[in-house]
Amino acid sequence: QSALTQPPSASGSPGQSVTISCTGTSSDVGDYNYVSWYQQHPGKAPKLMVYEVTKRPSGVPDRFSGSKSGNTASLTVSGLQADDEADYYCSSYAGNYNWVFGGGTKLTVL
Amino acid sequence: QVQLQESGPGLVKPSQTLSLICTVSGGSITSGGYYWSWIRQPAGKGLEWIGRIYPNGETNYNPSLKSRVTISIDTSNNQFSLKLSSVTAADTAVYYCGKDLLSGTSQGGIANWGQGTLVTVSS
């Protein structure tokens, strides 16, 4: 069982927006602004899409945005494209030099 | 752009020690003061952070694996390695090595990943 809870699936039509949640506790997501989001296509390594809750690494489109409220972080993908179909994982610092991941959400572009 | 490549046996017997090496190319493992990590992913499941190492040898481990994990660094060969002892079938997974996004801290996540290597624990 993963430390962070994500919905197993999410979906949206091309051009629409979809939001994926990531629920932790007051000891991880709620206590630190160190939430990252990764995109993983089948058979590929994860790719960092968002870090420190809201920041995007160079080269990541601004269609991907992150936010946090309390113990729950969220990733919003706007203007859905076919290539956005992938698994998405959240990660958070959990204190004591330990990092935890969510179980992943499969995003389907209808 | 730095590249990472995992290598090691794809099959390990139960109770034995899993050993993997991550070779870094395109830059020095000591340059910039970045942490280097190991992460694993059982088939069809989520990611699990195993641990990290700094170029000076400082390490941190996932508490759930700490008693069985050793991560070390070989700066002369631009490599870092993972050893996981007393393995069971539950340790069967794709193992990834990675480099942090931000210098001196892992708060920014892992920006560079190896392609991953499947390790199966079976007799």
Image: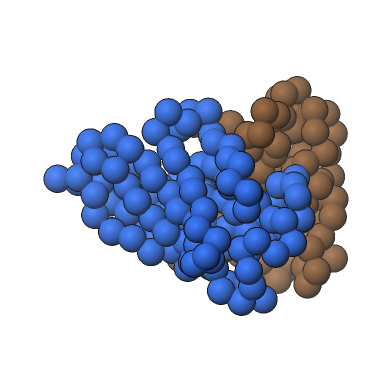
Depth order, front residue of B27/B86: B27
Q: Where residue B14 sits: x, y (%)?
A: 21, 39
Please state if B24 lies on the left or on the right of B67 as rendered.
right
Depth order, front residue of A29/B1: B1
**View extreme (left): residue:** B123
Quarter the C terminus of chain A occupies: bottom right
Chain A appears what colour? brown
Please state if A56 lies on the left or on the right of B57 as rendered.
right
Chain B appears what colour? blue
Please report the residue visible at 70 percent of the width from the left and 71 percent of the height from the top: A81
* Colour approach in the figure: by chain
How many marks the image carries: the answer is 0
**B105 over B32 or under it: above or below:** above
Q: Where residue B58 sits: x, y (%)?
A: 61, 42
Please state if B13 lies on the left or on the right of B24 as rendered.
left
**View extreme (front): residue:** B76
Q: Where residue B27 sits: x, y (%)?
A: 64, 73
Asked whether residue A103 is in view, the answer is no
Please report the residue visible at 66 percent of the width from the left and 43 percent of the height from the top: A91
Depth order, front residue of A93/B36: B36
Please report the residue visible at 57 percent of the width from the left and 51 percent of the height from the top: B37
Specify the quadrant of the image occupied by residue B51: top right
Depth order, front residue of A55/A98: A98
**A46 over B104 or under it: above or below:** below
Please report the residue visible at 28 percent of the width from the left and 51 percent of the height from the top: B120
Q: Where residue B67 sits: x, y (%)?
A: 42, 28
Asked whether residue B112 is in view, the answer is yes
**A83 over A9 or under it: above or below:** below
